[in-house]
C-alpha cells in the first residue's frame, strides 16, 4: 500500500502568513503541519509516499527531502495549476499503478493516527473507504448522507447539509478511483471535486465503506483552525526542559523548553513550547502558546498564540492573545511622544487595536 499527500494550493485563507511560505509548512507546536501527515502514514506502515506540490516552487521538496529521516521513499508530483482534490488524485495514477493507497490532505491533523483505517480498509472488500467526523459547520466540507449504515450520497459544501458529518481529509482507495476522477466534470468553482468522484463510485455500484474519527480531527484551513490545532497538539505534549530556567522563574503544567532557550524571571504556564535559542525575560507565556526558535520575548505577555521563529516582542503592555506572528516579526513598545500606534503591515494582514 502507498500514500498520497496533498501539499499544493495557495493557502489564500491563511494570508498574509502564506504570502511567504507554503501553508503545509506552517508550524504547529513548532513542527510543520506536513510532518504530522507524513508521520501518520509512516506509523500506519506505509513506505512509499507521493507528495503533490506546486510546480512553480521547490519549497516543500527542500523542507521535506527524500524521506530518509522517516525511513521512507518520497516522490514529488508537480501540479501546474490547482484544480481540486480529484485532480490531485488523477496526477498520482502512474505512481500508484494498481496498488491501494491512502490519500491524506497535508494540512489535516488527526489524533490516534491512521493505522486502524488502513487495516480496516485492507480487511474489507471496499473500493473506497472514507473517514467521517462530526463538525459544527458541515457546510464547509463534503457531507455524506447516510441511510441504513451506508453512504448513499455525498455533497460538496451544501447549503443544507444532510448530516452533521464531514468527510475528513483522509481517504483510502483502490484503482477504481482513477476511473471516477477521469469521468467527472469541473464544478461551478472550476475544480474537480473529490465529493463528485465519490458520488460517481456510489452511482457506479462500487463499495464505499466508512469509519468515524472518534478523537479529534482538524482541517487547518483558517487562522482559527491553526490556533485550535496548536492547542490540541500541545495538550498532548510530553513535558521536557532542555534549556535553562533561572531560580526566579516558574514553570507550570505541560511545558517543553528546547535546548539553548533561556527563561529569566518569567512565568511559563503550559501547555506550551519554547523553541531553541529563545530568550523569555520578565515575561508571561500562557497556555496553548508555541514560540518558534530564536525568538525574544521581554517584558510582555503572550497566550493562546503561535509565534514563528526570530520574532521580537518587547515591552508590549497589552497581552497578545489568539495571535499568529510570522518569521522575523517585531512587536515593540513605541518610544517618544505622542504615544501612538505605528504599523508596517503587508497585504491581507489583520490587526486588532484596543
Image (cartoon, rainbow, N blue to C red):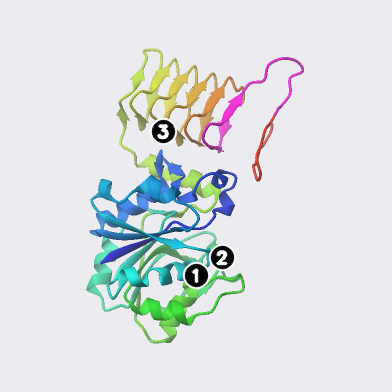
What's the residue at 34%, 39% (across, down)?
237
Whether 13 is drawn above or below 142: the answer is above
Residue 63 location (% of width, % of height): 39, 45
Residue 117 location (% of width, % of height): 30, 64
Q: Is residue 336 visible?
A: yes
Residue 317 location (% of width, % of height): 61, 22
Q: Quadrant of residue 211?
A: bottom left
The answer to whether residue 328 is magenta is yes
Which residue was labeled with disc 1? 143
Sequence-first tag of 3 and 1: 1
Assign the C terminus to one quadrant of the image. Answer: top right
SS for callout 3: strand
Which residue was labeled with disc 3? 272
What's the residue at 51%, 67% (across, down)?
84
Whether 250 is drawn above or below 253: the answer is above
Residues under numbered marks 2 and 1 in contact, where contact means CB atoms less than 8 Å apart: yes
**Alpha-carbon neighbours of circle 1 within 10 Å: few (<14), some, or many (≥20)?**
many
The answer to whether residue 214 is magenta is no
Q: How far apart are the two marked residues, 2 and 1, measured between alpha carbons?
A: 7 Å
Left or right: 250 with respect to 226?
A: left
Sequence-first tag of 2 and 3: 2
Q: Which residues are magenta?
A: 319-342
Which residue was labeled with disc 2? 139
Residue 101 location (% of width, % of height): 31, 68
Assign the N terminus to one quadrant of the image. Answer: bottom left
SS for callout 1: strand
Amino acid at each position: 500500500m502507498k500514500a498520497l499527500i496533498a501539499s499544493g494550493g495557495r493557502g489564500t485563507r491563511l494570508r498574509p502568513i502564506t504570502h511567504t511560505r507554503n501553508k503545509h509548512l506552517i508550524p504547529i507546536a513548532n513542527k510543520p503541519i506536513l510532518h504530522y501527515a507524513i508521520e501518520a502514514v509512516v506509523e500506519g506502515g506505509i513506505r512509499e509516499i507521493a507528495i503533490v506540490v506546486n510546480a512553480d516552487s521547490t519549497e516543500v521538496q527542500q523542507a521535506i527531502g527524500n524521506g530518509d529521516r522517516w525511513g521512507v521513499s518520497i516522490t514529488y508530483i508537480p501540479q501546474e495549476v490547482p484544480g481540486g482534490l480529484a485532480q490531485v488524485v488523477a496526477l498520482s495514477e502512474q505512481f500508484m499503478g494498481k496498488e491501494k493507497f491512502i490519500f491524506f490532505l497535508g494540512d489535516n491533523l488527526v489524533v490516534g493516527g491512521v493505522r486502524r483505517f488502513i487495516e480496516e480498509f485492507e480487511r474489507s472488500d471496499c473500493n473506497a473507504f472514507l473517514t467521517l467526523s462530526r463538525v459544527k459547520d458541515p457546510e464547509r466540507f463534503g457531507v455524506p448522507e447516510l441511510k441504513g449504515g451506508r453512504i448513499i450520497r455525498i455533497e460538496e459544501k451544501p447549503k443544507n447539509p444532510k448530516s452533521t458529518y464531514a468527510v475528513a481529509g483522509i481517504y483510502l482507495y483502490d484503482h477504481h478511483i482513477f476511473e471516477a476522477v477521469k469521468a467527472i466534470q469541473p464544478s461551478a468553482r472550476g475544480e474537480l471535486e473529490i465529493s463528485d468522484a465519490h458520488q460517481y463510485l456510489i452511482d457506479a455500484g462500487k463499495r464505499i465503506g466508512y469509519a468515524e474519527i472518534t478523537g479529534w480531527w482538524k482541517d487547518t484551513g483558517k487562522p482559527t483552525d491553526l490556533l485550535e490545532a496548536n492547542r490540541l497538539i500541545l495538550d498532548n505534549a510530553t513535558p521536557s526542559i532542555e534549556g535553562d530556567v533561572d531560580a526566579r522563574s516558574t514553570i507550570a503544567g505541560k511545558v517543553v523548553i528546547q535546548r539553548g532557550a533561556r527563561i529569566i524571571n518569567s512565568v511559563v504556564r503550559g501547555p506550551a513550547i519554547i523553541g531553541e535559542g529563545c530568550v523569555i525575560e520578565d515575561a508571561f507565556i500562557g497556555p496553548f502558546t508555541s514560540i518558534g526558535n530564536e525568538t525574544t520575548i521581554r517584558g510582555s505577555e503572550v497566550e493562546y498564540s503561535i509565534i514563528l521563529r526570530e520574532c521580537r516582542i518587547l515591552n508590549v503592555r497589552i497581552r497578545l492573545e489568539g495571535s499568529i506572528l510570522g518569521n522575523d516579526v517585531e512587536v515593540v513598545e513605541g518610544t517618544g511622544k505622542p504615544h501612538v500606534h505605528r504599523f508596517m503591515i503587508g497585504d491581507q494582514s489583520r490587526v486588532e487595536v484596543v
